[in-house]
Image: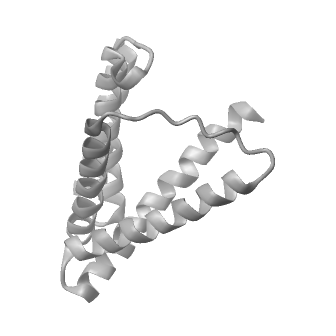
Amino acid sequence: MGGVFWPLLGIVVGGFLAIQAPVNAELSRNLGMPVAAAGISFLVGAVVLGLITLLMVSTQNAPPLNWRAPSLWMFVLGGFLGASFVTCNILLAPRLGAASLMAFLVTGQLVAGLLVDRFGAFGLAVREITMGRIAGAFLLLAGALLIRFA
């Protein structure tokens, strides 16, 4: 089960992104401001995550809180990347459509992931960039271009 569950969860959550972008774009059209829509999306997400955290901490089987003081750059970079991602999704969804947007997002995620893996950034294990991985990235880019222009 474990070998199938996590990839399937990744597919389902990837589907959430395909739905979130046009929903936030519609919110932006109603509000008249993409940044306001991104802010509301983050606010609601923060409330939901806070409630989930409280629920998890209140259960008997919850792992003990073992927090360390993170570096300031973790807050700043994580917040900046998240806000940029959501805001750009709001701007791009009406211009590219959901399928094209997702194809280009996944392509960008893969390329960035290959680089993060290659250098073992952020505490991840180092994984080499092989010809197979490069071919996969090019095939994904080709698929994204076909989705957009075919």
Residue 54 in view, yes or no? yes
Outermost residue on the bottom side: it is: 30
Residue 16 image offset from top left, x and y in percent: 49, 60
Image quarter of residue 73? top left
Image quarter of residue 136? top left
Count of marks placed on residues? 0
Residue 38 image offset from top left, x and y in percent: 29, 68
The image shows residue 13, relative to residue 72, as above or below, that is: below
Q: Where, quadrant-wise, is the C terminus in this rendering?
A: bottom left
Q: Identify the image's colour scheme: rainbow, by chain, secondary structure or one colour.
A: one colour
User: Which residue is at the front of the view, 54 or 116?
Assistant: 54
The image shows residue 46, relative to residue 105, as above or below, that is: below
Instruction: Name the residue rendered at 26%, 68% in the picture.
Output: 90
Outermost residue on the right side: it is: 60
Residue 80 image offset from top left, x and y in percent: 24, 50
User: Which residue is at the front of the view, 83 or 13?
Assistant: 83
Q: Where, quadrant-wise, is the N terminus in this rendering?
A: top right
User: Which residue is at the front of the view, 5 or 79?
Assistant: 79
Q: Is residue 58 left or right of residue 128?
A: right
Instruction: Name the residue rendered at 30%, 60% in the picture.
Output: 86
Q: Is residue 127 left or right of residue 79?
A: right
